[in-house]
Amino acid sequence: MFKPGASDEKAALAFDDMASALDAGLPLESMGGNVAFGDQVLLDLSRQRGITLKPTEKTVLEAAWKSGKATAALRGRAENRRRRAEFHREVWAGLRYPLLLLGMLPIAAAATYTLVGPSFSIGLGIVYFSISAIVIALARKIVRGDASLERYRIIGPLLDEMRELPYLESLHSLYGAGVPIIDAHRQAVATVRMHGLQERLIMAQKLLEDGAPLREALQTSASLSTETRSLLATGEQAGQLEDALQRALIRRQEVAGRKLSNAAQLVGQIAYGLAVTGVIIIFFKFYSGYFAMLRG
């Protein structure tokens, strides 16, 4: 049975288990670790436990081991995985029933084909093909980080909130693991897919390398949202940048989560409407064909 977020939940448990073992002072060998892997020992332990690490996680765990902050990094990865699993469950909850109805329509059309006729099945096929083509085209643009997506009415505002998440998550994790802000920022920029934001962050990186503080680099390059820049500027001036990065990340996750849940509900309502319309069409076509057959 399909369980959204199951792989993330499994990874979170494994991360917590490794962190607990390190806290208890267990030697690496007893955990299955191999000192020959050097700074990548946590990556090897994760692989042994069936965890597919994301590029950011690999960088963070390696940096954390170097700086002696492995336990905190593992617990941080576990918390991020749990948030991601909960997010997937919320989205799936809004889409599950409408998608089930849409999946039942072709079955109903095939079962009543003799009385309903081919017109409904042909029309249904055209509608499903069109929807699939649109979804595939949008997915490809998202993977490419196409800047034109920002102009789309529903997707644009949603991407405005979500595009900062990989950057903030990476920068917070790397900086918390002891990576200098210039190097952490450079690696965090590499996780950004949206070309518009990536270009502005590259400009911020150049300003950082010229000696500008992070708040000034982000402000000058107009990177990130006004709210995020304000949080980071206040935290950096107070000497609490790591805490500010965490607060900014949580804030963006909450806002993005609400917007994505609303978008999922909208998609669910559209799917439900299409399903109900299809059922009504099948109902009338079926009984009109049935009574016509009785008369004929």
Image: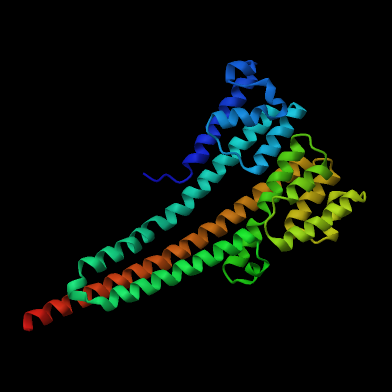
Q: Residue 11 at x, y = what percent?
A: 54, 35
Q: In the rendered view, tell whether residue 235 sits above or below residue 73.
A: below
Residue depicted at 65% across the width and 53% down the height = 252
* Left/right of residue 226 with respect to residue 15 in the rendered view: right
Pick the front one: 223 or 129: 129
The residue sitting at the right extreme is 211
* Quadrant of image for the N terminus: top left
Left/right placement of residue 124 relative to residue 151 reads left
Q: Quadrant of residue 55?
A: top right
State the residue lying farthest toward the bottom: 296
Residue at horizontal 57 percent and vertical 32 percent from the top:
47
> To which quarter of the image does residue 28 belong?
top right
Residue 24: image location, x then y, percent: 62, 17
Q: Residue at x 68, y 48 (%)?
A: 249
- Classify residue 94 as left or right of residue 254: left
Decide: is 67 above or below 226. above
In this view, the residue farthest toward the left is: 295
Query: Which residue occupies 57% across, 40% down?
Result: 81
Q: Residue 270, how many percent across, how many down?
A: 42, 68
Q: Residue 21 appears at what percent x and percent y?
A: 60, 20
The C terminus appears in which quarter of the rendering?
Answer: bottom left
Q: Nearer the viewer, residue 282 or 249?
A: 282
Picture quadrant of residue 284: bottom left
